[in-house]
Amino acid sequence: MVSVTYSSTRGCETQKNLSFRDVVMTGLAHDRGLFIPDSFPTVSKEELGSWRSLSYPDLAVEVISKFVEEDQVPKKKLAEIVKRSCGAFRHEDVTPVKEYGGHYVLELFHGPTFAFKDVALQMLGNFFEYFLETGSNGGRLAVLGATSGDTGSAAIYGLRGKKGIDCVILFPNGRVSEIQERQMTTVPDSNIHCVAVDGTFDDCQDIVKASFANKEFRDRVKLGAVNSINWCRVLAQTTYYYWSYFRVTDENPDIETVNYSVPTGNFGDILAGYYSKRMGLPVGKLIVATNENDILHRFFSKGEYHRYDIAETISPSMDICVSSNFERYLYHLAGDDPTVLSSWMKAFESTGKITLTGKKLEEARKDFLSARADTAMTLQTIKEYKDKYDYMLCPHTAVGVSAIHQLGEVSKATVALATAHDAKFPAACQRAVDPLPTPPPQLSKLFSMKTRSSNCPNDASVVQAFMEKRIEERIANEKAAGLKTAQLKKTVLSAAAVALVALVASQLAKKR
Ligand SMILES: *Cc1c(COP(=O)(O)O)cnc(C)c1O
């Protein structure tokens, strides 16, 4: 019997020993901390051996069930949720492993929006639906998110058509790439509402924050979030570290530990690798690969987690100035002590700096290496892999591959995580490869599809009013549809009754 509960990194008494259901529905803890398992389940050598031959979905069920209590989600239900989530992927391996350039590449972009966030958001959408069906939140959830690109579309594809859920995604008007905008606005489901805000991505994020801070609004609409700090997202991502470890060691039985190079922004992806290692997966080094927004590279190389301004790069999904999941790792570096962690975070909030030296930095460097690839290095890597191996890397993936080369870790024991399909970033890729390969039909057809979105000024109260109106409309429509079904049922029943009477009468007539 699994027994895993979760507590906030900041240690508030009311945010301790919560269930998987609670932490998934809540997202961010009420003390602004992040939820962490109270104890880490382990995987023995024997168990690991028995997982080797499993399919991706079966493996995912085994890994995830270690963190989910049976009374929260019965294992049969969990298997259903996991299989449905994996079923949204175009490849039967879900995340296939390939070999190029003397190392492995783990392709995470075979989901509906061609980027790795699908792995987590398909799963989160299905968990939300199950929790709402079984009584959470009175059966309704209103998701509000801001996006500068990939998160929005992955969230929309994870939540479209889900019962009881409304999803409002804000994006900065005219500042999202055309493909990314069309991936969002071509989704026809009535529970999806895309809103172009007259402002920047930061303005969109501020509207989301203001809405969560507005307790009345939050409670009235039953506000929820899908941002990368949701525990479910980290958990969903652990499976592919196991999966790729097995595929690499199937082909190279003498390899003992596997290294992973991860294009990193909010630290959610690589954190799943760190947790896999903590559970007992034989992981060597985890390579934190950053673009010019290199706060994490500066931390792992010099111990300086110091906030700088954001720079716009050709790998926009890694353009961050603080890394939202990093608090989870810092908590472990703080010796799993919420008091120490809280003091670090408080210092960071007032000075924009955390500096670690000596033993703590050494400890971090036991698990993590880091490297930074600027635009020139990234484009050079894309060009090199296309020229030498006829393989296209997206700009994010190329940052991770460049890191492997910079650190001298090219070997069959190293896996580069490929986080998006190159065709999502044609403008950047064309600077390295011209002409570009033909894009997948699912992406090219976006340009001839009907789009649907709304406009809002940069004003939280207007966005909130918009959101309430959409929710009211949908509830009214659902009621009307429910009434219609009831009426239809009545009509069908009375028609059936008439037919039955007629039948009986005719039988009686025959008898006579
Ligand atoms: C979100 C994203 C990343 C960064 O992942 P984090 O979990 O934020 O570190 C990298 N590449 C792509 C394509 C992404 O969409």
Image (cartoon, helix red, strand yellow):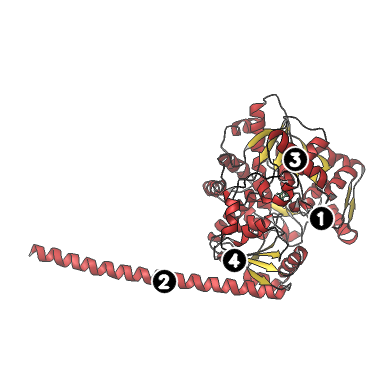
Which numbered disc flags the more N-terminal residue, 4 or 3?
3
Q: Amino acid at mark 1?
A: Val
Residue 472 quadrant? bottom right
Residue 40: x and y, percent? Answer: 71, 43
Visible residue check, residue 40: yes
Would you name the residue on which mark 3 appears? 383
Labels 1 and 2: the sequence-earlier one: 1
Measured as percent of width and height from the top left, residue 319 is found at 78, 54
The reply to whether dot 4 and dot 3 touch (C-beta < 8 Å) is no
What SS does tag 1 mark?
A: loop
1 or 4: tag closer to the N-terminus: 1
Mark earlier in primary sequence (1, 3): 1
Q: Nearer the viewer, mark 1 or mark 4?
A: 4
For label 4, count other residues whose C-alpha is less than 10 Å away and answer few (under 14), some (14-19) or many (20+).
some
Mark 1 or 3, which is nearer the eye? 3
Query: In this rendering, which labeled residue sits more in front, label 3 or label 2?
Result: 3
Measured Cα–Cα span from mark 2 to mark 4 = 27 Å
In the orientation shown, which residue stands out farthest toward the top? 254
In the picture of the structure, the residue carrying the numbered disc 4 is 452
Q: Earlier in the sequence, mark 3 or mark 2?
A: 3
Say which amino acid is labelled 4: Arg
Q: Is residue 254 above or below residue 443?
A: above
Element at label 4: loop
Q: Secondary structure at mark 2?
A: helix
Q: Nearer the viewer, residue 330 or 6?
A: 330
List the residue tagged with mark 1: 322
Question: Gap in Å between the C-alphas at discs 3 and 2?
Answer: 59 Å
As shown in the figure, which amino acid type bears the numbered disc 3? Lys
Instruction: Please report contact status of discs 1 and 4: CB closer than 8 Å, yes or no.
Output: no
Which residue bears the numbered disc 2?
484
